[in-house]
Image (spheres, rainbow, N blue to C red):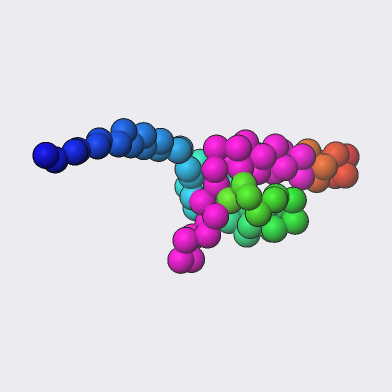
Amino acid sequence: MELVIFKTVRIVILSVKSEIQLSKELGLNLNFIRNTRKKSLARSLWTKSQNMVFYTEQGEHSIRNELMKRIFAKVKTRK
């Protein structure tokens, strides 16, 4: 007698975006995005694979908010 047990495997594909993709999409300098990430973002919101940085969905939302804050702060100081 043979007992076969099947496990259901759920694969969840998260939408992740690389720092380079984000830079191109927003039209912002890659170094500006990197500096913002290093100063403002928790390590759990992004991951590094080889020499590329990828943001989780929550991380992408957070980095966009931080970038917007920094850009508005620069515009405000120029007035």
Q: Which residue is at a point 63% across and 57% down the rendered structure image?
A: 34
Foreground residue among 75 and 10: 10
Left or right: where 75 falls relative to 8? right
Q: Which residues are magenta?
A: 47-70
Q: How many marks?
A: 0
Quadrant assignment, res 56: top right
Reply yes or no: does residue 54 show up in magenta. yes
Asked if residue 46 is positioned above or below residue 72 in the image, the reply reads below
**Residue at the extreme bottom:** 50
**Quarter of the C terminus within the rendering:** top right
Q: Position of residue 73 (x, y in %)?
A: 82, 42
Residue at (24%, 37%) from the top-left corner?
Answer: 5
Position in image of residue 76 (x %, y %)? 85, 39
Is residue 20 among the parts visible in the rendering? yes
At x 40%, y 36%, the residue is 12
Q: Is residue 39 magenta?
A: no
Q: Which residue appears at 19% of the width and 38% of the height? A: 4
Give the percent coordinates (x, y) of residue 74: 80, 45
Q: In which quadrant of the rendered image does the N terminus lie?
A: top left
Which of the two residues, 21 or 4, is positioned nearer the viewer here? 4
